[in-house]
Structure formats: structure tokens, C-alpha cells
Image (cartoon, rainbow, N blue to C red):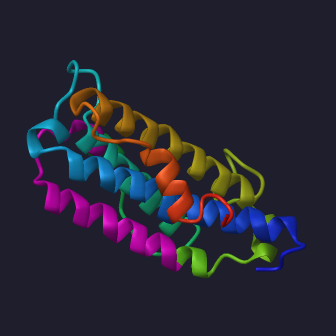
Amino acid sequence: MHMSNPLSYTLDSLHNRITKVFPAQIRECLAQLDDEQIWWRPNETSNSVGNLVIHLSGSLNHYLNFRIGGIAYDRNREAEFAERRHIPKAELLAVFDDMVSNAEKTFEGITVERLGDPSPEQKMYTLLVEDLISIATHVANHTGQILWVTKMLKDGALHEVWMKAHKHHGGWKPS
């Protein structure tokens, strides 16, 4: 990383949050919940933690790994939210971890110079950096929902998980 280049910091920050910090928080939530809790929903029109994990996997596989990284993926967005089968935690984690592994490969090919490239989603954005910011905020939003549901279902389960993940996975600069 070039310490004097703000774009380098931007790219590293997006990379760390998308592939390390938020996934660490999601994995910690899944570790705290049993299969029944992972698929619990407050009502039929709300998403379960399981649906949110499937949705994030599908969304990042499509927008990040396929559209930016060139890794083949055929998305069925409706199925991400329609899933009602209680997919076992290990299987759910395997899908999620595969997406994160591909995200790491995608980020290996994203240079500071590419941040100014045209967005692959021209209907939504102009530059590639906008796609990455959108992806990061999308993951942050759903990670927050997953954290909230986990805290609601498991009293005391996530003591300072947000700060711990940022400190240990590159979300904050080293102290």
C-alpha cells in the first residue's frame, strides 16, 4: 500500500470491510445461533438471518465477483428471499465462505487505477469505485440486521463484536 495515496487507503478499506470485517461479524452471529434461530423470522414478510446470508452471497457473487471480477455466476435473486428450507448452518457457511473466497480473488485484480474505470452497472453508477462503495454499504446494512437479530435472540451473545471485528480484521488502523 502506498501510504500517501488516499485511493490506496480507500481500496484497502473497502477490501478489508467487504472480505474480512463484515464476514467476521456474520460468522460470529452464525456461530451463536442454532439452525432454528438462523431461520427464524418475526413475520412472513421479513427475512431470516439465513435468507440474509444467502442474499449477501448471491448479491456479492453477482455484483462483485461476476460483474467486476469476471467469475461466472448465475443469480436467482428471488430465490434468495423465498428460501424456506432450513439449510444447515455448515452448508450456509460453505456458500458464504465460497463467496468471500471469490471476493478475495476479485480484489486481487482491482488496482487503484481501476477505481476510475467505467462501472459495469452503467444504469446505476458511473465509476467502478461507486460499485465498491455500494457493495460495502449493502453488506454493512445486512450485517447490521444479522447482528440485531442475533442480539435479540441470544442475550449477551455478541459482546462488542463490532469493535472486535474492526480491530482484528483490518477495519481500523493498527494501534
Task: Please state the horizontal and vertical placement of residue 5, each as a whole percent of the image.
Answer: 88, 71
- Apparent side of residue 4 relative to residue 42 in the rendered image (left or right): right
Q: Residue at x 45, y 37 (%)?
A: 144
Q: Residue at x 42, y 47 (%)?
A: 161
- Give the prevailing secondary structure in the magenta stretch: helix
Task: Please state the horizontal and vertical placement of residue 41, each as a whole percent of the image.
Answer: 21, 27
Q: Is residue 31 above or below residue 117?
A: above
Q: Residue at x 66, y 75 (%)?
A: 110
Q: Is residue 137 above or below residue 150?
A: below
- Apparent side of residue 148 relative to residue 132 in the rendered image (left or right): left
Which range of residues does the magenta coloring cover? 80-105
Q: Is residue 82 above or below residue 99?
A: above
- Residue 87 within the segment the image draws in magenta: yes
Question: On the image, which quarter does residue 124 sit in?
Answer: top right
- Apparent side of residue 168 relative to residue 149 in the rendered image (left or right): right
Task: Please state the horizontal and vertical placement of residue 172, each as a whole percent of the image.
Answer: 64, 58
